[in-house]
Amino acid sequence: MKYLDFSINGRVQNLMVDVFDAISTSTESKIKIAELLDTRSIFELVFEIVKETGFYNLDENFNLIKSLNIDTQEENREEALYNTWATMGENLNTAKTQEEFNAKFALFVPIILKRMEAINRMSA
């Protein structure tokens, strides 16, 4: 896995903190899908920032995203989003440096956005 370009690493980290802050306001033990969906604009901003650097087009990163983006067999789209979020959390917990943490987060951004879009299409 390649890391994020130094010029955007701090911005992505700050936006990632915004996502986790928005979700951590819940008093529930399990994150609600609505809470995840409320962070969509932050994920979209991260995606645009990261996309501009070519991070998603690097062969190694592109292959990782493809392997993480396997269509799931969950009963519904909300469960797919929740499971993707949980998988991201598990992967973030294996990071040894902040730069690795940020890059792993960025790898999951397009997948989470895809899951969010599937839910939005379903409700429209």
Image (cartoon, rainbow, N blue to C red):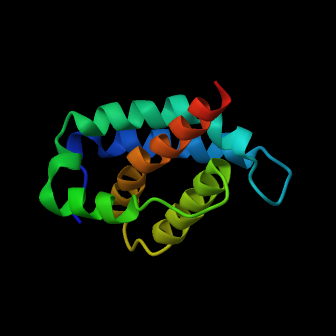
Q: Residue at x 67, y 30 (%)?
A: 123
Q: Would residue 5 be visible to someone looking at this image?
A: no
Q: Residue farthest to the right?
A: 27
Which image quarter: residue 39? top right
Where residue 37 sits in the image (x, y, percent)? 63, 37
Residue 103 percent location from the top left of the image: 33, 56
Answer with the quarter of the image where residue 69 lies.
bottom left
Q: Is residue 118 left or right of residue 103?
A: right
Residue 27 in the image: above or below residue 99: above
Residue 119, x across and y down, in percent:
61, 38
Residue 86 placement, left or right of 25: left
Label tally: 0
Give the camera-side residue of 45 and 57: 57
> In terms of depth relative to the viewer, which is nearer, 4 or 115?
115
Residue positioned 22% across, 40% down in the render? 7
The reply to whether residue 76 is in sight is yes
Residue lying at the far left of the rendered structure = 59
**Quadrant of the drawing holding the N terminus:** bottom left
Quarter the C terminus occupies:
top right
Give whichever of 123, 55 is nearer the camera.
123
Write the residue at 32% across / 58% down: 65
Measured as percent of width and height from the top left, residue 18 is found at 56, 39
> Is 85 situated above or below 54?
below
Residue at (31, 33) in percent of width and height = 49
